[in-house]
């Protein structure tokens, strides 16, 4: 079915009506709350749509729009044929319906059928099939706005760099001389642009440079960015854990994209993880860091990096971890975010 959204058009197939889409979106993790697709801000909608596509509830981007005019009596047959040829969704413009502003109405006795296809080849095959059976008039076969829309979103995703690392989406070219880490920007968090992630990347880089072959535990791995960065920067192995199941398909995709085989992922709770790691990184929020404080210290062999801390929350955490026997050795801030580095004594 065709759904209209404030910034343009998208086609969602497989969900029968708008209520089903809204209901489906309400099942998405609460940290990405798209209240209603029609009201959701762009980023939430983009996330929601890519999630729907990934889970098979929505088709790939319908890139081509085929508009045909046909006699009313044959419209149903044409519609069926278009779907057989791979049409992802369609819209009927009938004489008796009031035309939308800027949209022409068909002449009496005729219907306009606007159909959407993923590829030009599929749209052309559908046109040929229609022309061989009925007296159809081709109004237009064009690339849709959706394509441009998708591209516009891509253009807003940028890359992040540290001294030795470049992190960016797969369609950008990495900077020469840097280790490239590709992240599919499907999640709102974890593409390296957030200050708290960036600060962690710098800490990891400094540590891995000093201790090549080290081990790293990434608590709250999200897209897997921090564990993967460590692997790229010389760590022997990394383990990423997260309490949100929905992140794992993305981490797996990113691991494959970067051909990383020495990072494991798990949804086990921190206190169930065995052994110690040379460096432990946790970019989660201050209250979670507080809750996990003892377990974080226990898992750390040499260095503990805490991030996701807002400036006013820092002092409390510094005190808490110092009381647990850790020694504050780095404190860096970027915008309103603080990152703390503790050495074991
Ligand atoms: C702010 S994101 C950080 C993602 C990524 N590590 C980065 O630096 O960009 C926090 C992640 O931690 C996870 N998380 C929050 N609390 C957690 C906990 N107690 N145990 C494990 N993961 C947790 C969330 O599900 C989320 O994926």
Image: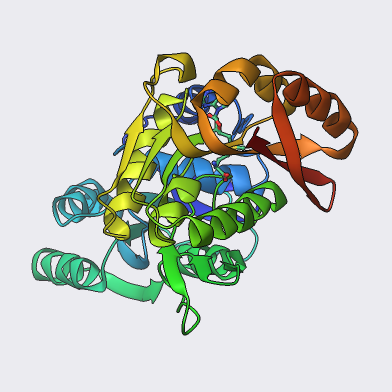
Residue 273: x percent and y percent? 39, 21
Of residues 121 and 169, the one nearer the viewer is 169
Quick check: 81 above or below 27? Answer: below
Quarter of the figure that contains the C terminus:
top right
Where is ligand 1, by quadrant?
top right
Position of residue 60 in the picture relative to residue 134 (left or right): right
Looking at the image, can residue 13 be seen? no
Examine the image and state in which quarter residue 327 appears.
Answer: top right
Quick check: 128 above or below 22? Answer: below
Please give the count of numbered marks on the rendered protein: 0
* Residue drawn at 53 percent across, 71 percent down: 164
* Residue drawn at 31 percent across, 35 percent down: 14
Position of residue 124 in the picture relative to residue 311 (left or right): left
Looking at the image, can residue 225 be seen? yes
Quarter of the figure that contains the N terminus:
top left
Q: Which residue, as the protein is rendered here, is positioned at the far right? A: 312
Of residues 174 and 226, the one nearer the viewer is 226
Residue 125: x percent and y percent? 15, 69
* Residue drawn at 19 percent across, 72 percent down: 121
């Amino acid at each position: 079915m065709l759904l209209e959204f404030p910034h343009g058009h998208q086609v969602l197939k497989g969900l029968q009506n708008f209520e089903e889409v809204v209901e489906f979106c309400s099942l998405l993790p609460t940290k990405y709350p798209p209240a209603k697709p029609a009201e959701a801000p762009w980023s939430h909608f983009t996330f929601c749509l890519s999630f729907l596509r990934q889970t098979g509830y929505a088709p790939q981007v319908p890139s081509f729009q085929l508009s045909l005019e046909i006699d009313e009596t044959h419209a149903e047959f044409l519609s069926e044929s278009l779907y057989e040829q791979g049409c992802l969704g369609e819209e009927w413009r009938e004489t008796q319906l009031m035309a939308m502003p800027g949209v022409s109405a068909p002449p009496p006795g005729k219907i306009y059928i606007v159909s959407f296809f993923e590829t030009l080849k599929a749209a052309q095959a559908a046109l040929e099939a229609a022309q061989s059976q009925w007296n159809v008039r081709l109004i237009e076969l064009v690339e849709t706005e959706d394509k441009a829309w998708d591209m516009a979103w891509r253009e807003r995703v940028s890359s992040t760099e540290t001294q030795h690392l470049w992190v960016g989406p797969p369609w950008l070219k990495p900077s020469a001389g840097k280790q490239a880490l590709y992240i599919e920007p499907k999640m709102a968090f974890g593409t390296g642009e957030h200050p708290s992630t960036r600060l962690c990347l710098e800490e990891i880089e400094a540590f891995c440079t000093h201790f090549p072959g080290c081990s790293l535990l990434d608590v709250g791995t999200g897209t897997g960015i921090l564990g993967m960065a460590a692997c790229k920067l010389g760590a022997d192995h990394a383990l990423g854990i997260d309490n949100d199941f929905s992140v794992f398909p993305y981490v797996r995709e990113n691991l494959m994209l970067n051909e990383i085989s020495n990072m494991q992922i798990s949804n086990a709770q921190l206190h169930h993880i065995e052994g110690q790691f040379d460096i432990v990184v946790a970019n989660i929020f201050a209250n979670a860091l507080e809750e996990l404080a003892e377990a974080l210290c226990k898992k750390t062999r040499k260095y503990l990096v805490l991030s996701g801390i807002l400036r006013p929350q820092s002092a409390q955490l510094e005190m808490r971890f110092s009381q647990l026997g850790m020694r504050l050795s780095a404190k860096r801030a970027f915008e309103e975010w603080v990152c703390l580095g503790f050495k074991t004594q």
